[in-house]
Amino acid sequence: MTNFLKQFFLIDDTPHKIAAGAALGIFLGIAPGVGVAATVVLASILRLNRLAAITAVLATNTWSLIVALPVSATVGGYLFGGNKTYLIDQFNKNYQLGYKVLLRKEILFDIVLPLAIGFVIVSGLTALFFYVVIYALIKINKK
């Protein structure tokens, strides 16, 4: 693991591109339903480091939903006047029924939208935090 981290910080690219690629991967890894393919495409379009982006999305993709869902439901519930328990319960009940149910007006605006906004905020803040940390660590390591 130590060797992997050492190699990660020795990627031959600018600190901004490495940190931004990792932040993109973290953002997309936390957001549900987005995976490696979307990360590679976006990193390529934005000219960010693809290796850092892929590493970050793989590191966050499998486990982050456990942590991110309650936090995102709390944020979304707060912004839209609901509560996290209701949002999570209703989403789980309706998710099992398929995407057509999730696109009904009352479900879309009462459940899906608050959760989606919550995920964007939580993912964005987490990615921003890790961008700053990774950027600083790379700058320190390159000195």
Image (cartoon, helix red, strand yellow):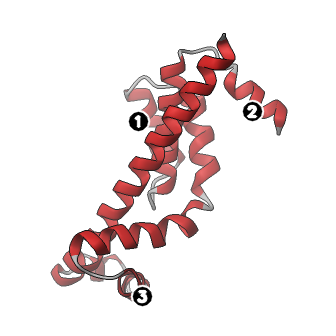
* Foreground tag (1 vs 3): 3
Q: Quadrant of residue 11?
A: top right
Picture coordinates of residue 141, whole percent (x, y): 68, 18
The residue where tag 1 is placed is: 42
The residue depicted at 45 percent of the width and 60 percent of the height is: 33
Q: Residues within 10 Å of mark 1 (few under 14, many from 20)?
A: some
Which badge, 2 or 1, comes first in the chain's sequence? 2
- Between discs 3 and 2, the one toward the N terminus: 2
Number of residues whose C-alpha sits closer than 10 Å to that of mark 2, classed few (under 14), some (14–19) or many (20 or more)? few
**How far apart are labels 2 and 1 at the CA level?**
23 Å
For badge 2, the amino acid type reads Leu
The local secondary structure at tag 3 comes to helix
User: Closer to the N terminus: mark 1 or mark 3?
Assistant: 1
Residue 59 in sight from this viewpoint: yes
Quadrant in the rendering for residue 78: bottom left
| Furthest-top residue in this view | 143
Which quadrant would the C terminus be assigned to in this image? top right
Give, as a three-letter code, the residue at label 3.
Asp
Q: Secondary structure at mark 1?
A: helix
* Residue at the spot of label 2: 5
